[in-house]
Amino acid sequence: MLTQDGAIFISIDDNESKNLRAICDEIFGESNFVGDVIWQKTYSPRNDSKGIPTETEHILIYAKQDGWTPKRLKRTTEMDDRYASSDGDPRPWSSGDAAAPGAATHQGMVYAIQHPITGSMLCPPNGRHRPFGGQSMLEIMNEWAEYEFRDIHDEARRAEICGVSPEDVRKGVKALVLKNPCEATFKAAQERYDKGHWPRLYFTNKGKGGMRLKRYLDSMDGKMPTNLWPYSEVGHTDEAKKQLKTLFNDSAPFDSPKPTRLMKRMLDIASDKNSLVLDFFSGSATMGEAVIQKNADDEGQRKFILVQLPEETTGQYSTLTDIGEERIRRAGEKIKSEIEAENAQLTLDGTPKKVPDIGFRVLRVDDSNYEDRRKLVDEYSQKDIDDDVDITKMDRSDLDLLFEALPKFQLPYGSKIDVLSGGEFDGHTVYSVNDGQLLACFEDSIPESLVRAMAAFSPRPSYVLVSENGFLNSAARTNFTEIFKQSADEKTGATQIRII
């Protein structure tokens, strides 16, 4: 069920983590293993535990295909505090290595650079190469003095750096040298250093040392997630229980919820603004709340599908699914009210925060809405045929019939559904799916005026679904089909009709 760029997160304890890893390696392939995250689920381990008290839980991550990488997390204040501006540069920066690994495969970027102040030749460390292309390096060094590329016939030194023989080193790679290496040039470069606000490639030891690279804060990406998720970052089990008690008026109806911060960490590194998130052991529906919170944070439109068996529980709610439904309702309303209160405090020039979609639809797995009356030909009697005109089960509603039909038209269960009963439909109940993409009517009597109103509906429906009971005879059924054929045109095409 994963999309090609999808990933799966599976929470498991120590007892079964080894077996789960073996199963996932077989299903997804060892190459699609992303990581075994250790979640610190508690901050106060039990003293009465036998053996070693457990503080952590595993979260195995697998991707659908090789090459999946997690998104970066937001940078922390501690990370940003490492950046400063000791030279007066208006952009905060930190000192970085002025060379990159992979000299053997980037031999054209392995060359000496003449120091602008001392005149000495500086080579990259063994196994490393210059950080930028030749033209960029020339432009940066020209901020110190006038430079040019010149062949200094240093094949032996470059071969040593690249880890190859002098015979195999790339020929004709030129060094970056001063055009006029004299005392006046050196003095001007020293004055340039003393002035401050140095170029991106600068020199240590008061300008006379080795080369370093400025790494600017505003060009840095976020923090890479690691395989250790401490409770300080993603929450713990006690926090999860307190969150649930807050939503349910100081009474937690579920014993082992996950913290929303844990679920949001998964969304942070694995989802886009329009992602579809599936949790097939949803428990108390923590993931549903986390998706709504994440959408509130970045104005995303993520959708969730939560799957849970209706396990019986004690207390106010009879099943675990009832708890999940109520949690999503309460969490959604809480998030909505908090945003509205925040927006009410804005000044005239403030930008109001968008309230996320907090709606959801609850479906249950059941058998078909129709009786199975299949028989062999010689088993049928006239009475059987008469009885089988309507095989709809007695306890099923119009919406039950509509939802069973949606997959037949390749329409998702999350489709928008409106009930149209007045005006052009003269009091008859017609269901409009996705603003008229599908029109459905399950009434026992469908007059011609209603058929014509459905055929004239704008925008023209792609599909029409009606009950066979709505037609008095076969002539009325044929007339129904012909009306839609006559209303078709070249632009919109014919409507697909299905009679059940």
Image: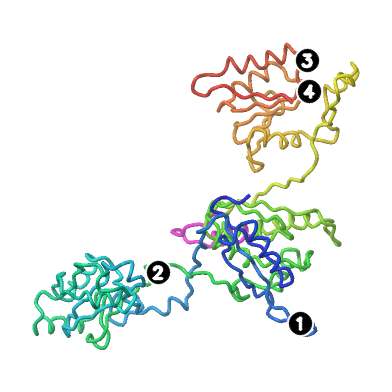
The residue labelled by disc 1 is: 46
The residue that label 3 is drawn on is 472
Secondary element at tag 4: loop
For mark 2, give the secondary structure: loop
Label pair 4/2, CB-CB below 8 angstroms: no
**Residue 19 falls in which quadrant of the image?**
bottom right
- From the image, tell me which residue sits under label 2: 220
Please give the range of residues in magenta.
334-354
Badge 3 element = loop
Q: Quadrant of the C terminus?
A: top right
Considering only order in the chain, which callout, 2 or 1, is on the residue closer to the N terminus? 1
Query: Which label is found at residue 444?
Result: 4
Instruction: Give the mark, 3 or 1, whose residue is nearer the N terminus.
Output: 1
CB of mark 3 within 8 Å of CB of mark 1? Answer: no
Q: Is residue 212 above or below residue 271?
A: below
Looking at numbered disc 4 in the image, what kind of residue is underneath it? Asp
**N-term-proximal mark, 4 vs 2:** 2
